[in-house]
Image (cartoon, rainbow, N blue to C red):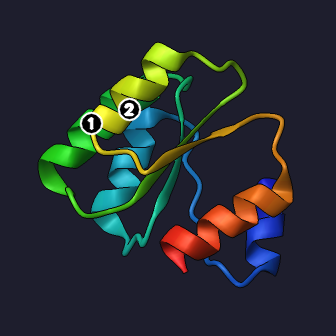
Amino acid sequence: MLKDRLRAMGFDVVTASDGRKALEAVRSSWIDGILLDFEMPVMDGLSVLQELRECHARIPVLMMSGSHNPEKVDRAITLGAIGFVPKPFDFALVGEQFKRFFG
């Protein structure tokens, strides 16, 4: 649903089913920004973010999660994430964030 909404807003969207595939997508595609979940199979979001920062330090990363854990959010910001979006999504807020950071 989020993918469809973002496409309707004019964004090209690439999805990945797990953390390792997300890193592969970044390596093989031109990515302007990433919406990254803390909880993913294979590699969690913080591990993906940390690896991203080692090789793609300038790509903006917006974290998301269904459970708000302030320590994880703080760690993500320390690693260079630009912000946090809680689930369930407020699509207007996500759209504003995307336009602000990725548009």
**Amino acid carrying mark 2 in the image:** Ala
The residue that appears at 28% across and 33% down in the rendered structure is 78
As drawn, which residue projects farthest toward the bottom?
Answer: 10
Q: Position of residue 41 (x, y in %)?
A: 53, 23
Instruction: Identify the residue shown where x is 65% and y is 78%.
Output: 11
Location of residue 85 in the rendering, given as x and y in whole percent from the top left corner = 65, 42
Furthest-left residue in this view: 54
Q: Nearer the viewer, residue 24 or 78?
A: 78
Taking depth in this image into account, of 21 and 59 the one nearest to the observer is 59
Which residue appears at 26% of the width and 46% of the height? 52
Picture layout, residue 27 above or below residue 71:
below
Q: Give the x, y percent position of residue 95.
A: 73, 66
Q: Is residue 76 above or below residue 27?
A: above
* Amino acid found under the numbered disc labelled 1: Leu
Figure quadrant of the C terminus: bottom right
The answer to whether residue 96 is visible is: yes
Left or right of 3? Residue 90 is: right
In the rendered structure, the answer to whether residue 55 lies left or right of residue 68 reads left
Asked if marks 1 and 2 touch (Cβ < 8 Å), the reply is: yes
Q: How many marks?
A: 2
Q: Which residue is mark 2?
A: 76
What number is the disc on residue 79?
A: 1
Name above or below for residue 11 compared with residue 33.
Answer: below
- Residue 68 occupies quadrant: top right
